Image (cartoon, rainbow, N blue to C red):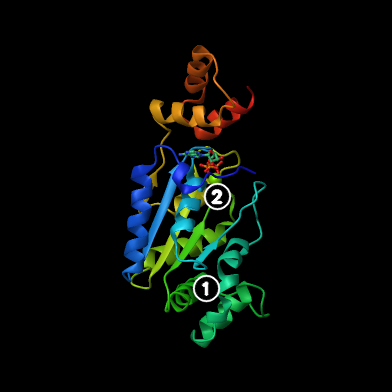
C-alpha cells in the first residue's frame, strides 16, 4: 500500500489542487460536479483524491477501495458507495428503493434493471446531500466491477443541483486495465494528471532522500523516474 503525503506536501500540483478546491466550492454552492482523473500509475491520482477528501466537510466523504485483482462481483463498488448512505433510502420511490435494495443484497427478488438502480443511486445521493454537500470518490476504476462503473457513470451524467461531487480516478497504465470501464467514463469532465516537471521532481526527491547524495546520482534518479512520483520515491528508498 502506498502512503500519501499531507496536502501541503504535494509537489507541483497547484493547478490540480486549485481545480479540486473550485469543485468543492461549486458543490458547497449547491451545484453538483463530476470529474475523472486520468493518469499513469504512480503519478499521483490517489494523492489528489486524498487531498480532495481532506478538504471536504468532515464526515461527508464516501470512498471506494478497489483490490488489484479486480472485482467481478457485480455491484460491489456500488455497495461501497451506497452502504454509508442507506439511512437515506426511505424517501425514495418504492420501485427505486426495492431495485437498489435488491442490487445491494439487502432484499431478495428478480435482478433489477440498471436504469432503475441508477435512478435510485441518484436519488440516494441527492437525499444524502440534502442537508450538507457530499463527496463520492471512486478510485481505481480500472479494477472495479463494470456494472457499478456503468451505474456510477450514469449517475455522474445526470447530476445537476444536488450538492454532490462524484470524482473518479482511472489509471491509464495499470496491468489488467479494463478498457470497457474506461470507455464508460468518456465524455465526463476530465483532469489529466501529468508527470512532475524536473524542478518538482527534484524537490520531491530531495525531501525523500535521507541525506545529501552525489549530484550525478540525483540527476540519474530524476531522469530514470521521468517525473513519476512513485518511481522517484521507490528509487530514493533504494539508496
Ligand atoms: N505531487 C506529489 N507530491 C508528493 N508525493 C506524491 C505526489 N504525487 C504522488 N505522490 C506520492 O507518490 C506515490 C504514488 O502516488 P499515487 O498512489 O497517488 O499514484 P496513483 O496515480 O494513484 O497510482 P495508481 O494508478 O497506481 O493508483 C504515493 O506515495 C504518493 O503519496
Ligand atoms: Mg491510485
Classify mark 2: helix, strand or loop: loop
Quarter holding residue 14: top left
Split into 4 quadrants, where in the image is the C terminus? top right
Q: CA distance from mark 2 to mark 1?
A: 22 Å
User: Which residue is pictured at 55% across the width and 74% down the height?
Assistant: 85
64 or 186, which lies in front? 64
Which label was assigned to residue 134?
none
Split into 4 quadrants, where in the image is the N terminus? top right
Which label was assigned to residue 117?
1
In the picture provided, is 177 more to the left or to the right than 196?
A: right
In the figure, 159 relative to 215: above or below?
A: below
Quarter holding residue 145: bottom right
Residue 188 appearing in the image: no
In the picture provided, is 6 more to the left or to the right than 1?
A: left
Q: Is the residue at mark 1 in contact range of ligand 2, meaning its CB lies under 8 Å from it?
A: no
Q: Is the residue at mark 2 in contact range of ligand 1, meaning its CB lies under 8 Å from it?
A: yes
User: Which residue is pictured at 61% across the width and 72% down the height?
Assistant: 103
Q: Position of residue 217 (x, y in %)?
A: 53, 15
Q: Position of residue 130 (x, y in %)?
A: 42, 78
The first of marks 2 and 1 along the sequence is 1
Residue 27 appearing in the image: yes
210 or 139, which lies in front? 210
User: Which residue is pictured at 46% across the width and 79% down the height?
Assistant: 127
Q: Position of residue 74 (x, y in %)?
A: 63, 62
**Nearer the observer, disc 2 or disc 1?**
2
> Looking at the image, which residue sits at the far front?
211
Amino acid at each position: 500500500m502506498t502512503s500519501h503525503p499531507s496536502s501541503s506536501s504535494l509537489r507541483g500540483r497547484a493547478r490540480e489542487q486549485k481545480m479540486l478546491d473550485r469543485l468543492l466550492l461549486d458543490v458547497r454552492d449547491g451545484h453538483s460536479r463530476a470529474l475523472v482523473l486520468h493518469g499513469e500509475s504512480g503519478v499521483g491520482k490517489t494523492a489528489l483524491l486524498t487531498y480532495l477528501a481532506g478538504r471536504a466537510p468532515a464526515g461527508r466523504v464516501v470512498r471506494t477501495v478497489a483490490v488489484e485483482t479486480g472485482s467481478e462481483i457485480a455491484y460491489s463498488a456500488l455497495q461501497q458507495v451506497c452502504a454509508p448512505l442507506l439511512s437515506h433510502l426511505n424517501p425514495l420511490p418504492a420501485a427505486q428503493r426495492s431495485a437498489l435494495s435488491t442490487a445491494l443484497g439487502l432484499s431478495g427478488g428478480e435482478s433489477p434493471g440498471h436504469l432503475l438502480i441508477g435512478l435510485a443511486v441518484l436519488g440516494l445521493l441527492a437525499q444524502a446531500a440534502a442537508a450538507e454537500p457530499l463527496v463520492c470518490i471512486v478510485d481505481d476504476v480500472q479494477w472495479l466491477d463494470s456494472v457499478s462503473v456503468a451505474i456510477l457513470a450514469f449517475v455522474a451524467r445526470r447530476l445537476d443541483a444536488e450538492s454532490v461531487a462524484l470524482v473518479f480516478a482511472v489509471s491509464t497504465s495499470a496491468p489488467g486495465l479494463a478498457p470497457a470501464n474506461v470507455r464508460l467514463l468518456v465524455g465526463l469532465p476530465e483532469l489529466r494528471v501529468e508527470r512532475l516537471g524536473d524542478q518538482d521532481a527534484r524537490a520531491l526527491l530531495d525531501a525523500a532522500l535521507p541525506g545529501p547524495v552525489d549530484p550525478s546520482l540525483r540527476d540519474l534518479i530524476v531522469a530514470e523516474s521521468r517525473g513519476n512520483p512513485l518511481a522517484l520515491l521507490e528509487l530514493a528508498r533504494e539508496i
